[in-house]
Amino acid sequence: MIKDIIDSKTKAWTDPGKVSWYTTQITANRGTNTLKNNTEIGFIDRYAIGQQVLDVCIGTGRGSLQLLDKGYSVTGIDSSQAMLDACQKLAGDRPITLQQADLANLPFPDGNFDTLIALNVLVHFPHWRDVLSEWSRAVKRGGRLVFDVYSLDHVE
């Protein structure tokens, strides 16, 4: 059952048409989206440290593209090539490293990043405790994990 949930979440964003629709929706600054975007991006801007940032399930890059303009080195992973393509398009000429990878099995050595960010990710995966352990492994001692959860119900 858990594998089925993970597989369905992973495959959900492989359709370029759906990703295009999502990109339009998530970047629209109207209504509650304005508050959500400003809060999340402000949170990342405030708590990201060091120079090396990993954005897990980067999607369109909404959470990390602004860090490029501030001199951070950003690496983004996503299971969806369609999402990575959308992110690259939004990044334009700014330098960013993007690769297809599994959020629960990061292809990086221990302590490779100063900050790991993940927006709207953990709530989709019932094995979040294992995922957090893997994310912690990829971050340097004293580094930061910056992520969100929608409610304590998910934790329980």
Image (tube, rainbow, N blue to C red):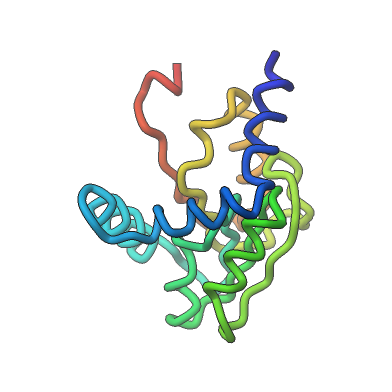
Find the residue positioned furthest to the bottom. Answer: 93
Q: How many marks?
A: 0
Is residue 156 placed above or below 79 in the rendered structure? above
* Place of residue 73 in the rendered image (x, y in percent of width and height, measured from the top left): 58, 75
- On screen, residue 5 versus residue 120, left or right, reads right
* Place of residue 61 in the rendered image (x, y in percent of width and height, measured from the top left): 52, 63
Q: Quick one: quadrant of the N terminus?
A: top right
- On screen, residue 104 versus residue 35, left or right, reads right
* Place of residue 148 in the rendered image (x, y in percent of width and height, measured from the top left): 41, 41
The foreground one among 99 and 88 is 88
The foreground one among 33 and 75 is 33
Q: Quick one: quadrant of the C terminus?
A: top left
- On screen, residue 132 versus residue 47, left or right, reads right
Q: Residue at x 76, y 43 (%)?
A: 105
Q: Residue at x 58, y 29 (%)?
A: 125
The foreground one among 45 and 83 is 83
Residue 126 image-quadrant placement: top right
Is residue 145 placed above or below 51 in the rendered structure? above
Q: Residue at x 60, y 50 (%)?
A: 57
* Place of residue 53 in the rendered image (x, y in percent of width and height, measured from the top left): 56, 65
Residue 87 image-quadrant placement: bottom right
Find the residue positioned furthest to the front. Answer: 17
- On screen, residue 70 versus residue 143, left or right, reads left
Q: Residue at x 66, y 65 (%)?
A: 85
